[in-house]
């Protein structure tokens, strides 16, 4: 089949094989690839709307026993620069975000072996009680797996207890590239690909919405990027539990791994192929935090229907060398300048007409 025929098939919702996904990634003209992805996005959502969520990321601890080489944020146990916030400190940050209209709170940190499940249950109960209008979209597969190991419990039981305490959904952080060769090089102590999928499956079977991410641009090949998407697509076929896919590129500047930064063209190519290959994942998010707002704006023409969040507070990517930041007004402005209409959503993609736009 010709490249033109492959793009036409994918643009109308036809499923690409792994080999076809690799082929369009490697060979398709970028503009034609983007046009096909945008056509698919408009077929899925034939409106002028681009959504975003008012959220914050609270990095409650940088103590971590996983020691990923691509991470500049973590500190090993007992390190003099290690920190863990108190519950009161976390709640102060939740209040600050909620006062700005945040509906989604992402509490994420390192895998700190000194924190048991009771610590999180108490914290989540307090957040849910004191700020009932925010959704606790928090932790990561690695943190859940770490708690399961500490408590000697199945991941499903850990998730069930966290859910009962107020955690409503599980972010896709910690996926990186779901290929064992890559993980052995950049995150040898982290959960294996099958274990990441296993925790996600358990969360989804418990009725917790989840997202899937992909950190690309470290050491993986083009084929391994498509393999990662294929892993996500297979679980989505089984459970339908992913609400969105969020590709973002590795920031190398202050990490032990080092390396190069992905180009803007590479970012757009990954987005477009993601939209075409992941025919069963509803939303594609423009992760502007690493490439910046202008690239995030271009992403709206390469398959993305969502601008992600305001990310009021975030430390992990910042510590790796990224300096990008955005206010609600910034996000709404770039959406409007691209010819779309910004609309606020919640964690579950319900549109929030009760929350006023920043520029309204």
Image (cartoon, rainbow, N blue to C red):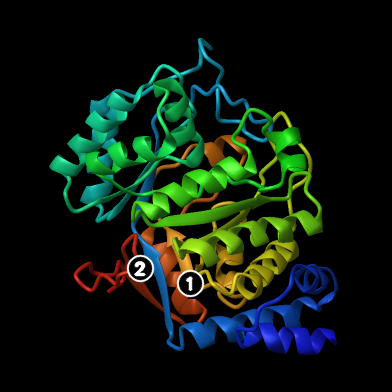
Question: Residue sitting at 26 percent across and 32 percent down?
Answer: 121
Q: Residue 4's spot in the image, x, y percent?
A: 79, 88
Q: How crowded is mark 1: few (under 14 residues within 10 Å), some or many (20 or more)?
A: some
Q: 312 or 68, which is in the foreground? A: 68
Q: In which quarter of the image is the C terminus?
A: bottom left
Question: What residue did someone put label 1 on?
Answer: 282
Q: Residue 81 carries which label?
A: none
Note whether 152 is above or below 355 in the view shown: above
Question: Residue sitting at 49 percent across and 29 percent down?
Answer: 110
Question: Residue sitting at 59 percent across and 35 percent down?
Answer: 191
Q: 209 or 207, which is in the foreground? A: 207
In front: label 1 or label 2:
1
- Label 2, secondary structure: give it: loop
Question: Residue sitting at 61 percent across and 88 percent down?
Answer: 12
Question: What residue did someone put label 2 on?
Answer: 349
Q: In which quarter of the image is residue 128?
A: top left
Note whether 46 is above or below 250 in the view shown: below
Q: 81 or 32, which is in the foreground? A: 32
Q: How crowded is mark 2: few (under 14 residues within 10 Å), some or many (20 or more)?
A: some
Between the C-alphas of marks 1 and 2, the distance is 10 Å
- Label 1, secondary structure: give it: loop
């Amino acid at each position: 089949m010709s490249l033109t025929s492959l793009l036409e098939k994918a643009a109308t919702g036809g499923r690409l094989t792994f080999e076809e996904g690799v082929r369009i990634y490697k060979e398709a003209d970028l503009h034609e690839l983007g046009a096909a992805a945008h056509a698919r996005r408009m077929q899925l959502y034939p409106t002028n709307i681009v959504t975003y969520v008012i959220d914050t990321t609270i990095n409650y601890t940088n103590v971590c026993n996983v020691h990923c080489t691509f991470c500049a944020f973590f500190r090993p146990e007992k390190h003099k620069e290690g920190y863990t916030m108190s519950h009161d400190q976390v709640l102060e940050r939740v209040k600050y975000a909620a006062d700005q209209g945040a509906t989604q709170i992402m509490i994420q940190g390192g895998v700190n072996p000194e924190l048991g499940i009771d610590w999180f249950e108490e914290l989540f109960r307090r957040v849910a009680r004191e700020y009932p209008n925010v959704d606790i979209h928090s932790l990561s597969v690695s943190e859940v797996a770490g708690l399961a190991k500490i408590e000697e419990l199945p991941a499903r039981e850990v998730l069930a207890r966290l859910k009962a305490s107020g955690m409503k959904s599980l972010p896709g952080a910690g996926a990186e590239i779901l290929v064992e060769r890559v993980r052995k090089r950049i995150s040898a102590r982290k959960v294996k690909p099958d274990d990441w999928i296993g925790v996600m499956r358990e969360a989804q079977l418990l009725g917790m919405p989840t997202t899937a991410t992909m950190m690309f641009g470290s050491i993986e090949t083009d084929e391994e990027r498509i393999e990662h998407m294929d892993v996500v697509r297979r679980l989505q076929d089984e459970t339908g539990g992913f609400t969105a896919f969020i590709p973002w590129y590795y920031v190398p500047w202050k990490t032990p791994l080092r390396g190069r930064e992905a180009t803007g063209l590479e970012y757009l190519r990954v987005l477009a192929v993601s939209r075409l290959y992941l025919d069963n994942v509803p939303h594609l998010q423009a992760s502007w935090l690493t490439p910046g707002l202008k690239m995030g704006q271009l992403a709206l023409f390469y398959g993305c229907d969502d601008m992600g969040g305001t990310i009021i507070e975030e430390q992990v990517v910042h510590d790796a060398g990224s300096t990008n930041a955005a206010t609600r007004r910034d996000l709404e402005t770039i959406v409007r300048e691209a010819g779309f209409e910004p609309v606020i959503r919640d964690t579950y993609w319900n549109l929030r007409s009760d929350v006023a736009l920043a520029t309204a």
